[in-house]
Image: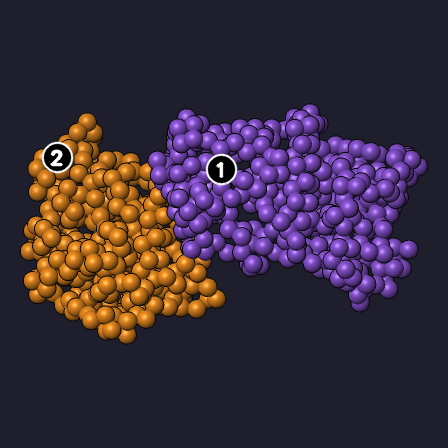
Chain colours: A purple, B orange
Amino acid sequence: MLTGRSASTPSDEGARPDVAVVGAGPIGLAVAWRCAARGLRVVVHDPASGSGASAVAAGMLSPVAEAYFGERQLTGLLLASAARWPAFAAELTEATGAELGYRTEGTLMVGLTGDDLAEARRLWAYQQGLGLPVTPLRPTELRDREPALAPRVRGGALAPTDHQVDPRLLVPALRTAARRAGAVLVPQPVRHLGEVDARVTVVAAGCGAAVLTGLPVRPVKGQILRLRAPGGVAPGFRHVIRGYADGESVYLVPRSDGEVVLGATVEERSDTTVTAGAVLRLLRAGVDLLPELAEYDLVEAVAGLRPGTPDNAPILGPLPGRPDVLAATGHHRHGIVLTPVTADLIANLVTTGVPDPLLAPFGPERFGGAGSAGVDGPGRTTEEDRWS
Amino acid sequence: MLTGRSASTPSDEGARPDVAVVGAGPIGLAVAWRCAARGLRVVVHDPASGSGASAVAAGMLSPVAEAYFGERQLTGLLLASAARWPAFAAELTEATGAELGYRTEGTLMVGLTGDDLAEARRLWAYQQGLGLPVTPLRPTELRDREPALAPRVRGGALAPTDHQVDPRLLVPALRTAARRAGAVLVPQPVRHLGEVDARVTVVAAGCGAAVLTGLPVRPVKGQILRLRAPGGVAPGFRHVIRGYADGESVYLVPRSDGEVVLGATVEERSDTTVTAGAVLRLLRAGVDLLPELAEYDLVEAVAGLRPGTPDNAPILGPLPGRPDVLAATGHHRHGIVLTPVTADLIANLVTTGVPDPLLAPFGPERFGGAGSAGVDGPGRTTEEDRWS
């Protein structure tokens, strides 16, 4: 591991980078920004920055609404990262002048039918049991907050501390911040880690991490729609709305410019085609919850691939037996919310060599030897030669 | 009016055109082709050939399935034009070598629910009362013909003589045919008829005819979807399917290359935005009728503007008091099927000066003086000077 500014004195110009980051999505860029800001020489490799899961992400910062059964450790990391988001966003805007679409109205969670509400209430009870701020609302309170909700919506609850950011504003801002801090972006693909020459390599390649490292990261297809309120006005609702509607789980994210992101499917597929059935299910649930959406323009239907893992939690830390290769991938549906904590913890690990206790549950070693299969595989000898 | 080849002897080269056609959609191009093939000097004006209603049209040649209550004269014209289509298509393919996607499997008309079927049966009885070939099918016969239909579909009938063509193949073929016959395409807009210098002007400008002529042509918005069977195979059904599904009327047009056109809304609006509600209604009805569509790729959602008229029938013939200006517009939902008869009748009228009896119900004069308002309006004096 490396320590502070000593690693990149002027005499090192043109020398081997301290850190090579593979992947210029939000995770890779934020890691690069944090490392470069600490004086490390950083190179980021990506032929198409921001073209992965982040281009399709809604940008919900919702550790409360997304606290699911059986994911307590993940929920802890989501909460830790969400707590860092206000300062992270302010710092990023200060560094770049960029507007990020950061909004703090909270998440309104609703159930359309009696069955939907019963399912929602089970989850809210679980979330309250964790001590999270979830406030059930009476129907009149729900309408007072969002008059545009369908009259049929049976009930809801508020998660007031959930926020949102616009990923399509976030990624360019992170590129700018990383560059201004001194990171160099190389628009070339990395086909295997032997091509990378740096003291530490951070693999933040999303789904691409699987072939690079052998880690069990798999694509999880998600389809989303982008709608736009007619007439160029803001949407007729202010909160992020997460709803169950006849068994379908959807979210609606309003942006100030009139855009609404309506998502998302979760499919064990690796193609990125938009299917009629998925669009139908999303629109039906969305319009059932918020009838005015029927009048909105449908401006985009798109599919992306999330980097999923066996336990739905990210993979953060050194590959087994390879302290010079750090994984920062597998963020699945949580890449945007987990960006600040990932960047901070990985940058700390790079500079101090000491892993933050927060990282403990998320190391690659939890998947056993499979985590280093790619590195230990056929290319190993060559890579050893270059990395030793 | 003009007669035959005498109008364009070699000594006329560079002289005033015999015929100026305003609009290079299927109607204008077919008129130009027919006129040029008779030896007339033809110029066609359009800055964006094929960008109007035809780009969104499904290409159903369905005079039987589209024989609606209260439109007997229109039905007669649709039948007359559909009867010309096989020869027209063969002639066009011979002239150009172009494949047109011409298919003859017939239309299957179905009702999803009992209410839908009751509504459909009223229409089938009307169509049979006109002597049209409509054959009710028993449920087993329906499934034998199209096993992909949803089990819930309550009943159906076959219109075996209805055909289809692909408008996106038709329009380029017509452009080629018109050019090869000698017509000149000028990619410039015509803002008023005074800009056109020809012995006869044919206004085939679709919705644009209103401002050029004052005729009561109004935009009628239609939204359609294009789906594609996964894996590059043909769709799992062969007939054009027209269905009522929970009160929604839709059609499904299968193409040999895997494409399915699913349409269409009929909206009294003049914008071309795609709305969430329309896409939802189309997909819901389509998937309810043919469940396998849920697995199809959604490759296009688009809106276009049909040139509608007060009685839903086209406007064909000379403007009142202006025998040198012929309307060939207002084809509304029937532009593709009506292309051959419109082209033949207008070309005959141009060359012989004698209107075919088929034209009688469709003249501009049926709308009274309003039909020539634009021509008689502020620009009249100038136009008279140029046209006299």
Residue at image location 79% in from the left, 33% down from the top: A37
Residue at image location 74% in from the left, 32% down from the top: A180
Name the mark on residue B370: 2
x%, y% of residue A141? 43, 27
Disc 2, SS: helix
Disc 1, SS: strand
Cα distance in 3D space between marks 2 and 1? 57 Å
Mark 2 falls within which chain?
B
Where A369 sits versus B138, above or below?
Answer: above
The three-letter amino acid code for the residue at tag 2 is: Ala
Q: Looking at the image, how many numbered discs can be counted on the residues?
A: 2
Q: Which residue is mark 1?
A: A109
Residue at image location 16% in from the left, 53% down from the top: B346
The answer to whether A331 appears left or right of B99 in the picture is: right
Give the quadrant of the C terminus of chain B.
Answer: top left
Q: Compare residues B362 and B200 and report the one nearer the observer.
A: B362
Q: Residues within 10 Å of mark 2 (few under 14, many from 20)?
A: some
Picture quarter containing residue B236? bottom left
Is residue A55 at all visible to an observer of this figure?
A: no
x%, y% of residue A106? 54, 31
The answer to whether A367 appears left or right of B132 in the picture is: right
Same chain, labels 2 and 1 = no
x%, y% of residue B68? 14, 54
Q: Compare residues A104 and A153 and report the one nearer the observer.
A: A153
Labels 2, 1: front one: 1
Tag 2 and tag 1, C-beta contact below 8 Å:
no
